[in-house]
Image (cartoon, rainbow, N blue to C red):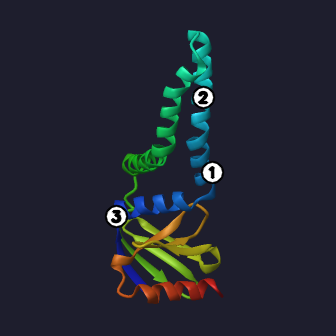
């Protein structure tokens, strides 16, 4: 089976957001940063109250408000930082082969993905899993990378999905 598709920066960004939102380590990091920081604010409130010689409650209220706002808004900030950093990485290096026109061949042996800069090959035994979101199929070949197949480029998404799944179950 041969698939021709154009991989855009938006597709790559969606993959990164999908991966981060489904990554156990990223979610653990997000929760730690989201909920540990307000505890640091409480410690600052205590130190500030002692230094300024004011009641702890007067010092606590502003820091508590900032902590609550942090818990509410940090996930959006975290996501925007991931998107921003990913865009910077795409633009700073030579990534011509990453985005653009691709031709993927799904053979009996595995996957061959070609573009204007070269090709990559992987046997079906090197494919870890197939997952998807509303826009793309992600064929993971490691715990942090995947072939991104935009659904908009496929004539029959179900056929491609079933073909890949059948190869993974062998």
Can residue 1 be seen in the rendering of this structure? no
- Whether pointer 2 and pointer 1 mark residues with C-beta atoms closer than 8 Å, the reply is no
Task: Give the class, few, some or many, for how many residues have Cα within 10 Å of label 1's Cα (few <14, many ≥20).
Answer: few
Q: Nearer the viewer, mark 2 or mark 1?
A: 2
Residue displayed at 53% across by 57% down: 20
Location of residue 25 in the rendering, given as x and y in whole percent from the top left corner: 63, 53
CA–CA distance in space, label 3 to label 1: 29 Å
Left or right of 92 on screen, residue 21: right
Indicate whether 45 appears above or below 155.
above
Q: Earlier in the sequence, mark 3 or mark 1?
A: 3
Q: Nearer the viewer, residue 95 or 38?
A: 38
Label 3 near label 2: C-beta < 8 Å?
Answer: no
Q: Position of residue 153 (x, y in %)?
A: 34, 78
Residue 8 image label:
3
Instruction: Specify which label sits upstream in the sequence, 2 or 1.
Output: 1
Instruction: Classify 10 Å Cα crowding around label 2: few (below 14), some (14-19), many (20 and above).
Output: some
- Residue 121, labelled with which disc? none
The residue identified by callout 2 is 42
Residue ID at (57%, 23%): 57
Q: Considering the numbered disc 2 on the image, is that residue within a helix, a strand or a loop?
A: helix
Closest to the camera, between mark 3 and mark 1, is 1
Residue 120 in view here: yes
For residue 35, side relative to residue 4 (left or right): right
Pick the quarter of the image with the C terminus. bottom right
Question: SS of the residue at dot 1?
Answer: helix
The residue nearer to you, when weighing 49 against 115, is 49
Q: N-terminal of the two: label 2 or label 3?
A: 3
């Amino acid at each position: 089976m041969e698939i021709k598709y154009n991989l855009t920066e938006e597709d790559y960004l969606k993959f990164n957001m999908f991966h981060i939102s489904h990554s156990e380590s990223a979610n653990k990091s997000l929760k730690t940063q989201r909920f540990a920081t307000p505890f640091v604010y409480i410690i600052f409130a205590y130190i500030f109250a002692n230094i300024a010689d004011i009641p702890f409650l007067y010092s606590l209220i502003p820091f508590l408000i900032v902590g609550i706002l942090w818990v509410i808004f940090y996930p959006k900030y975290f996501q925007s930082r991931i998107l921003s950093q990913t865009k910077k990485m795409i633009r700073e290096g030579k990534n011509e082969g990453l985005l653009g026109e691709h031709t993927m061949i799904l053979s009996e042996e595995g996957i061959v993905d070609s573009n204007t800069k070269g090709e990559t090959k992987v046997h079906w035994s090197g494919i870890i899993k197939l997952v998807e979101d509303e826009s793309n199929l992600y064929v993971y070949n490691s715990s942090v990378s995947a072939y991104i197949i935009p659904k908009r480029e496929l004539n029959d998404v179900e056929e491609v999905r079933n073909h890949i799944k059948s190869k993974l179950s062998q």
